[in-house]
Every structure is written in C-alpha cells, then in structure tokens.
Image (spheres, grey):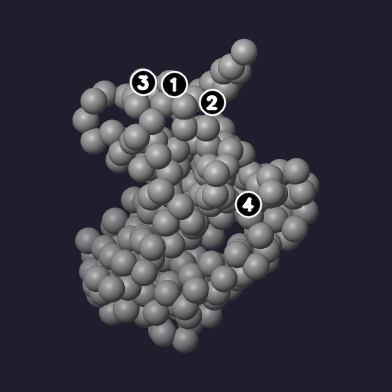
C-alpha cells in the first residue's frame, strides 16, 4: 500500500507564477523550520498540499538548489541543505567583505531621505520584535542590510549581496534564536546607523566587522552544537 506523506502545513496556490510562488513558500518553510535541515523535499506531498502538479515544485527545488538552500542526491531527490560550520565561515567571511565596502559607499551617499529610510526600518524591527513571527523578524533584519547595499549605489555589489540572500536568511534565523530580548537585534542596528551617519570609513568598517563577526561566532557555535540528526541530510 502506498504511504501518503504527512502534510508540512502549506497553503494551496492560485494558478499564476506557480514556480515563483512555490519557491517563496518553500523558502519560508525552511526559514520557519517547517522543513528542517536534512529533511527530504517530497515533491508529490508538497504538490498535493499546494494544489499544483509536481512540475513547478521540481523547478522550484532546482532554483533553491542554485541558491544553496537545497541539495540533490541522484535517484533520491532534494533535501534541505545541512548547516556545516565551514559553510557558515564562508558565508560570513564573504558577507563581511561585501557589507564593509557597501557601508563605506553608503555613508558617502547618505542623504536625509536615506537616513529616514534606515531609521524607519529599525523601528519596524522593534515592532516585529514584539510579535511571535520569527520569519518576519528575519526578513526585516535582512531588509536593513540590503538597504545599505542599495544606498551604496553599486548594482554589482547589490547583486553579490542578493546572491547570498537565501543563505543569509537561514543564518539570520539562527541569530534570532540567540537573543533573550528580540529588541536586542534592532538595537545592534542602531549602532550601525550611527557610524554610517558619522561617515568615517575606518570606524564604519570596524563596526560592521564587529557586528557581523559577533553573529558569525554565535551562529558558528550554534551550528556546531546542533544534533547530527538535525544538522545533516540522510546519506
């Protein structure tokens, strides 16, 4: 008798831009922990929950593999990428390089409108800290850092940041679990905005290095402490 995969908890989709919708939903499912590291992405089960055919699910899985969220095994399918300490080191090492440069460029382009935009985003981070929506907190954190890259005014720099986006969301999700007070996340970004407003390149670089480096150390520690049953895909 054929077994039916238990539902993950996804919502059926409308028949428009199916691949894009499935990609976004699977990304959120990974960030929220509905699909844990090492979990198999069962195409038939997910397609059934979403009310679509298997084709857009398979295409979305391929896109997420390119973005680093999923890995594929021949004849076995797609699995949520496991979190290795070496992966965290590579992501954060590159992130520091990208964001330090972006921060220096952004400070040169800092206008009253740009300051207000970043301040409003910090306010949003404080607001979301008071609600029980971890995925939303991750997204607002990510938006603040992307805004800095936007203000920097380099399309190629922004593209580099966006290439890291999915993996950043996963690791920022880990950061959020480290704070007893979620408002602490917003407060650390207030210090970033302060040095961007002051405009001293060396201080900006040092502050961003400290901000991201602290997250790097904590996330790396958390990943190393994850049980092997949670931290890896079946082999």
What secondary structure is found at the residue carrying circle 1? helix
As measured in the structure, the alpha-carbon distance from the residue carrying label 2 to the one carrying label 3 is 13 Å
- Relative to 25, is 78 above or below? below
What secondary structure is found at the residue carrying circle 2? loop
The disc placed on residue 49 is: 1
Indicate the position of residue 229 as horizontal and vertical percent values.
75, 43
Q: Nearer the viewer, mark 2 or mark 3?
A: 3
Q: Are marks 4 and 1 in contact (CB under 8 Å)?
A: no
What secondary structure is found at the residue carrying circle 4? loop
Residue 170 visible to the viewer: no
Answer with left or right where residue 78 lies relative to residue 223.
Answer: left
Indicate the position of residue 63 as horizontal and vertical percent values.
38, 50
Indicate the position of residue 72 as horizontal and vertical percent values.
53, 50
Residue at 42% in and 74% down:
98
What secondary structure is found at the residue carrying circle 3? loop
Q: Are marks 3 and 1 in contact (CB under 8 Å)?
A: yes
Closer to the N terminus: mark 1 or mark 2?
2
As measured in the structure, the alpha-carbon distance from the residue carrying label 3 to the one carrying label 1 is 6 Å
Closer to the N terminus: mark 3 or mark 4?
3
Residue most toward the top? 1
Residue at 23% in and 25% down:
15
Q: Are marks 1 and 2 in contact (CB under 8 Å)?
A: yes
Q: Which residue has dot 3 on it?
A: 51
Q: Which residue has dot 4 on it?
A: 82
Which of the pair 8/193 is nearer the observer?
Answer: 8
Q: Which residue has dot 2 on it?
A: 8
């Amino acid at each position: 008798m054929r077994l039916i995969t238990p539902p993950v908890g996804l919502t059926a989709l409308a028949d428009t831009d199916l691949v894009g919708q499935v990609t976004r939903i699977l990304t959120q499912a990974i960030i929220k922990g509905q699909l844990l590291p090492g979990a198999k992405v069962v195409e038939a089960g997910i397609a059934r929950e979403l009310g679509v055919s298997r084709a857009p699910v398979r295409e979305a899985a391929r896109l997420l593999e390119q973005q680093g969220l999923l890995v594929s095994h021949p004849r076995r399918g797609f699995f949520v990428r496991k979190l290795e300490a070496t992966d965290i080191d590579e992501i954060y090492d590159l992130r520091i390089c990208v964001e330090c440069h972006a921060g220096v460029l952004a400070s040169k382009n800092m206008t009253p409108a740009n300051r207000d935009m970043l301040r409003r985003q910090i306010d949003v981070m404080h607001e979301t800290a008071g609600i029980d929506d971890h995925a939303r907190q991750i997204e607002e954190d990510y938006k603040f850092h992307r805004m800095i890259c936007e203000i920097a005014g380099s399309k190629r720099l922004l593209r580099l940041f966006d290439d890291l986006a999915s993996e950043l969301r996963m690791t920022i999700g880990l950061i959020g679990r480290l704070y007893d007070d979620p408002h602490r996340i917003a407060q650390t970004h207030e210090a970033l905005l302060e040095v961007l407003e002051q405009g001293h390149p060396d201080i900006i670089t040092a502050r961003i290095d400290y901000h991201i480096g602290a997250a790097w150390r904590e996330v790396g520690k958390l990943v190393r402490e994850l049980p092997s049953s949670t931290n890896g895909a079946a082999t």
